[in-house]
Amino acid sequence: MTINTHILIVDDDDDVRNLIDSFVKVAGHKTSMASSAEEAIELLKTNIIDIVIIDIIMPGMSGLELTDLIKKDYDADVIVMTGYSNDYSYEEAVDKGASDFICKPIRFEELLLRLKRVLKERRSTKERTRMLKKLQEMAITDHLTELYNSRHFYNQLDLEIDRSRRYNRPLSLLFLDIDFFKQYNDIFGHLEGDKALVELGRVIKSCLRTMDTAYRYGGEEFTIILPETSCEEAAIVAERIRTSVKAECLSPEPEKLAIVTVSIGITEYFLDERISDFVQRADSAMYISKQKGRNRSTVLFKEK
């Protein structure tokens, strides 16, 4: 059975290189070969390589130097091989980042065992990394809307404010609240209310640039961080969101459509103000929109 892995064999000895290539192919792996470290680097640049089998002694860059470079710049594991077992140790190879060490002459059974072990550890490491990334994403994501959550909002806002201060670039903030959402839940039920929240999250994301980030702040409130954006530009984004939300018809009951609207507050960060004041001003601007009749956006500047 073919195993979906790509093995690169690097050795300046043609006979050894071809013999190992035959061994590895028999085991069902895809292979590539290089006669020097420089040739290997070119193959690493253009191919996805899982494991590199490297001879230590080569003209030019040595196998240990190549191992060090691979571990720094490429996502590949390394098995180092040598015919001079007394001159090089397992510890030296591991210090450079090698996953295993094998002595020449290469025995087919030993090579396959070492390949299997390294591949197993590689897959386990990738799975652990994938699970850790998933857990990290879950910790900062609202499970319902799949927007970021309020915990991540404050972390990201702190970073964006620091960037705004350092480079003297504008930073704006939007606060959104769904109009009469309690009434919507009372009429159609909380399940349909959740569907409305999900739809609103989708619409918000569709209106933003890659650098912008949207958050479910809590309940039916949302907030959006707009880096590199002045208050005037943020007002345009707010109106785009407001009109897009209003244009989205929901169907909470068979043959019955419902329109949801949002009230939006807009403000821009001022140098050296506290984060709490910045957030409070956006929140206050949103409540002004509600007081003025809802389904609108309001810009609120810092008082001089």
Image: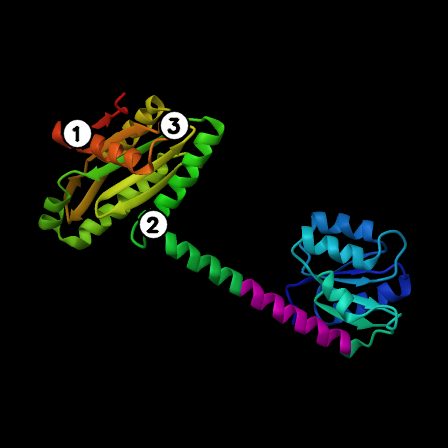
Residue at 89% of width from left, 70% of height from top?
84
Residue 121 colored in magenta in the image: yes
In the image, 237: left or right of 14?
Answer: left
Q: Where does the image place residue 191, in percent across and percent down from the top left?
A: 19, 55
- The region drawn magenta spans 110-127
Quickly name the residue at label 2. 151
Residue at 43% of width from left, 40% of height from top?
159
Q: Nearer the viewer, residue 40 or 98?
A: 98
For label 3, the SS is loop
Measure the alpha-carbon separation of dots 2 and 1: 25 Å
In the image, 258: left or right of 200?
Answer: left
Q: Is residue 211 above or below residue 17?
A: above
Q: Which mark is first along the chain, 3 or 2? A: 2
Label 2, residues with CA under 10 Å away: few <14, some 14-19, many ≥20: some
Quickly name the residue at label 3. 271
Measure the alpha-carbon separation of dots 2 and 3: 23 Å
Quickly name the residue at label 1. 288
